[in-house]
Image (tube, rainbow, N blue to C red):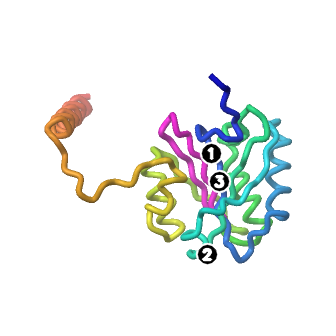
Amino acid sequence: MPMETAADSREYRVLFFCPASSARLERLEAPVRRLLSRIQAPPAELTPIQESGALSEAGWQVYLVRSLTERSAAQAMAAYVSEATCALAAEVDAEVLGLYVDVSGDSARICRCGPEDGPETFAGRRQAALNRTAEWLEVAPILLSAIFQLDVPDADYEPDADDRYVEEKLREAKALMERYRQGK
């Protein structure tokens, strides 16, 4: 079985959404390189994502942190997304949104930062982070589903017997937990 390189890995992803009008790759690379060096992360490059046509139309350019070795620079940057986002916002003098996605852990962390503002962050499951990212970028969530590696919910979805059973058990568990907490 061939070993997948982190450069092609979709397990961990760090992306930055910058206003297309002020996003220039040359200006964005330096702050990212400085951060990677300081945290001793594996070497990486910032790569524009070209297939983000609808996001481009909404005024955003998307950049992916792409590892150059088998170790994941994106995973190393997980705790530094806010710092990197604010550094990029200061560099381009515009609002930037940073995103870290852990596909196998079903979690994501996002940060929105303006050039003179402190960071606004959100962390949670990928679907919740997708919805918040779409809200912050003012785009439809469907435009971000590939980035978050989530299937778009089927509009014709109807829960089956198994789904209803699981939902009922979750409601029962929630009610029991509430009673337990009130009893303390």
Identify residue type, mark 2.
Gly
User: How far apart are the two marked residues, 2 and 3, measured between alpha carbons?
Assistant: 16 Å
Identify residue type, mark 3.
Leu
Task: For residue 86, say whether it is visible.
Answer: yes
Q: Which residue is mark 2?
A: 59
Is residue 136 left or right of 113 when viewed as pictured?
left
User: Marks 1 and 2: in contact by CB < 8 Å?
Assistant: no
Q: Let me know if residue 82 is in the magenta part.
A: no
Q: Which mark is residue 13?
A: 1
User: Marks 3 and 1: in contact by CB < 8 Å?
Assistant: yes
Residue situated in front as seen by the camera: 181 or 111: 111
Q: Which mark is residue 15?
A: 3
Q: Secondary structure at mark 1?
A: strand
Residue found at x 54% / y 70%: 54
Q: Position of residue 179 (x, y in %)?
A: 19, 32
What secondary structure is the stretch in magenta mostly built from? strand
Tell me which label, 2 or 1, sits earlier in the chain: 1
Q: Does residue 152 lie above or below 105 as drawn? A: below
Residue found at x 72% / y 51%: 83
The quarter of the rendered structure image containing the N terminus is top right
Q: Bounds of the magenta span?
A: 96-112
Identify residue type, mark 1.
Arg
Q: Secondary structure at mark 2?
A: loop
Residue found at x 50% / y 47%: 149
Tell me which label, 2 or 3, sits earlier in the chain: 3
Q: Position of residue 137 (x, y in %)?
A: 54, 67
Residue situated in front as seen by the camera: 118 or 56: 56
